[in-house]
Amino acid sequence: MASALAALAAARGRALLLCALLSQLGPCSGNSELSTAVNITWSSINFKTILQWQPKPTNYVYTVEISGINSNWEKVCVHTKETECDVTDKLEKVKDTYTAHIVSEMISGTEKFEEPSYAISPKFTPYNQTTIGRPGIQTYELTDSKLKVLVEDPLIPYRFPNKSFKSIREIFKNDLEYTLYYWKDQSTGKKEATTKSNQFEISIDKGKNYCFYVQAIILSRRENRKSQKSKVNCTSHEREVLDEYGTEVFIIIAAAAIVILITIIGLSVILYKCKKTKAAKEKETMPLNDI
């Protein structure tokens, strides 16, 4: 009897191993009546990670099982009829590589010994694959020929022991760099500066206004290296009138003023001559007084 049970367990183990090896070719199904998940994707921004799949279940439910190379299998979103699951809390070891099983299950009161149907997700490593969100611009200052910018690190869902949120700097440390892209207002030529800190101080042309934005860069990545762009900010240093509108506009205005002045002078001369001519004619036609 013991040998029979051992043989059964060994056969089941070989079947599961074969199922895992063939997972890229199709779902592992122990119940042909259940649909297994397809189009499984990881959606992750600043380590907030949602696992998504299709199709919407009809007469069955899903349970997500997730495991890292260095962690055990855990269940989350048990018996859900949704097609997404927030797995953020299970991925706090951000340098680990995770795999998820999307298990299709019938809800019934009878116990079944048949292996449930499940599909296997692509592998996911949060440190390398999460998208870095938009950095914030905490403050900026324009003084004479210097532009100073203070960048705010994006926050992540994981917390310190005091319950405050961590930022991407606590995760990436020296692997994190910021690039500042800046250009003169009303110009298209961009320049850039980089820093491993949160502060920029760059030399600019005195009396000019500048616009700028910031992006984070994860230096060790080969793909998805840059974060989303920060909001574009522009300085508001008071500009001289010529800087504001340009010399061409003033040339046009001056030319228009000269034309208007010449027109006024010309009309004045014509009116004067008309009046003089009219007065002379009236004098010639005036009747002589009786002697």
Image (cartoon, rainbow, N blue to C red):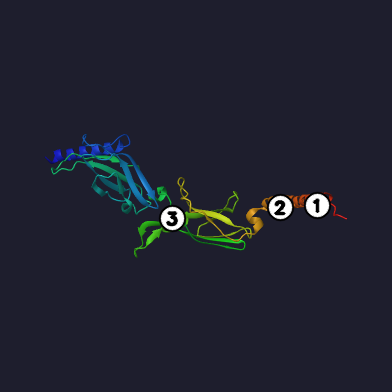
Q: Which residue is mark 2?
A: 257
Q: Looking at the picture, which amino acid does disc 3 mark?
A: Phe
Disc 2/disc 1 C-alpha distance (Å): 33 Å
Please state if 85 lies on the left or on the right of 272 as rendered. left
Q: Are marks 2 and 3 in contact (CB under 8 Å)?
A: no
**Image quadrant containing the C terminus:** bottom right
Which residue does the numbered mark 1 point to in the structure image?
279
State the SS at label 3.
helix
Dot in front, 2 or 1 = 1
**Marks 1 and 3: CB-CB under 8 Å?**
no
Q: Residue furthest front?
A: 291
What amino acid type is highlighted by mark number 2?
Answer: Ala
Q: Is residue 267 left or right of residue 53?
A: right
Viewer-proximal residue among 281 and 158: 281
Horizontal side of residue 125 vs 111, given as left or right: right
| Residue 287, x across and y down, in percent | 83, 51
Question: Where residue 61 sits: x, y (%)?
Answer: 23, 43
Residue designated by label 3: 172
Q: Residues within 10 Å of mark 1 (few under 14, many from 20)?
A: few
| Residue at image location 49% in from the left, 55% down from the top | 177
Q: Is residue 39 visible?
A: yes
Q: Regarding mark 1 in the picture, which secondary structure is present there?
A: helix
- Judged from this view, the residue extending furthest toward the bottom is 162
